[in-house]
Amino acid sequence: MAARGRIPFSYVARNLLARKLTTLLTASGMALVVFVFATVLMLTEGLQSTLVQTGADNNAVVIRRSAQTEIQSGIERDQAAVIESHPLVALDETGARRVSKEIVVLISLPKRASNKPSNVTIRGVGAQGLTLRPHLKLISGRPFRFGSNEIIAGRAIAKNFKGGGLGETVRFGNRDWRVVGIFDANGSGFDSELWGDADQFMQSFRRPAFSSVIVRLSDASQFAQLKTDLEHDPRLTVEVKRESTFYAEQSEVLAKFISYLGITLSVIFSIGATIGAMITMYASVANRTGEIGTLRALGFTRADILYAFLVESLLLSLTGAVVGIVAASFMQLITASTMNWQTFSELAFGFTLTFKIVLAALGFAALMGMVGGFLPAVRAARMNIVDALRAA
């Protein structure tokens, strides 16, 4: 009598449990590959999220045309005045225009841990600079006073760089600057910056021009009109971008490099893990020849045998995937720090695990399981019933 239905899932799962050591070793290899794959995606997501969060959709960044970063840009004072006077610029409750004319410069500071110097971004802002970034909150100390040698430091700078802590002193531009406050920018790129008075910074570095002008729109939907007006104004040679878009583009080169390198390594490692799964499944087929013959004698078809061994291989890979994803989730407790290749400054960011990354990791593991288990499953399905029973 022919057997009805597929081979039960419980039967497949018990076969894995019956070979605990080989199952553990193969699943561990799969887990390691998935851990690397997920960590790379989390690193890229964390970098992009950090810089995307830096900007706001209702803020526009105005920089010199063809400049890729604020450091490369220069906007003269008369040009900044033209931008500030545009009618689409929002006003605050006192009637002041919500504009911050800013200067961005790189300096070198020694790290606390290694004493090795690294580039740090300092940002001089106007009177509206802090209010244009509402996600930026002081967590200790007080705001700097305009017209003074006072600065405030991002949380990552205070933690990682000498001179960046509350009450400490940093020397740049031939002057000493005292840190009077520490701010938290909610994990954005501003956490890796020092802020002060733009006019004081321009005097110290003898800069005649601003790096950028940050504009708050009275209506975010009018960005296209503002962009058209400013970019076609004959008095200006500027480019206008939404602040969120501008900072997202700052992560593009580094994020692509991390992603390509990580995925390449993951693919290389996955070849070894897939071969390991294939060897495990071939061994399973060899050790269960009589069992396969018995299943065929009971009426299960070749397709049923193929299905059972493929499910077994998938279950093996997905078990490793779950372990790898859980291990990767703990990376969210770590803050990474690297140089942003587009701004050449130090940037601190975290690992970010999303549902999309979990699905990608599970899909990657399932692919390894399918590839590793297909040929052994085909071999099991093609066994002759009589030969299989004799081998038992």
Image (spheres, helix red, strand yellow):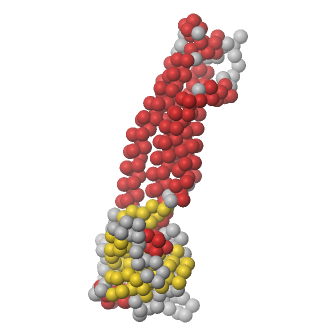
Looking at the picture, tell me which residue is in the foreground, 170 or 125: 170
Q: 252 above or below 90?
A: above
Vertically, is 159 above or below 364? below
Q: Depth check: give the residue in front, 275 or 363.
A: 275
Task: Report x, y in % for residue 239.
Answer: 36, 74
Relative to 108, is 23 above or below?
Answer: above
- Place of residue 1 in the rendered image (x, y in percent of width and height, measured from the top left): 71, 10
Residue 387, quarter of the rendered image? top right
- Residue at x 44% of width, y 30% of height: 275
Horizontal placement of 344 versus 386: left or right?
left
Residue at the spot 66% in from the left edge and 13% down from the top edge: 299
> Which one is nearer the viewer's eye here, 238 or 49?
49
Q: Is residue 297 left or right of residue 379?
A: right
Residue at 46% across, 56% down: 43
All told, the count of numbered labels is 0
Residue at the (55%, 41%) spot, across then down: 321
**Residue 199 placement (x, y as % from top left):** 37, 89
Picture quarter with the C terminus: top right
Q: Is residue 86 visible?
A: no
Place of residue 23 in the rendered image (x, y in percent of width and height, measured from the top left): 56, 31
From the viewer's side, name the closer residue of 262 and 392.
392
Give the vertical position of 326 relative to 133 (above or below): above
Q: In the image, is 325 to the left or to the right of 65? A: right
Whether residue 258 is visible, yes or no, is yes
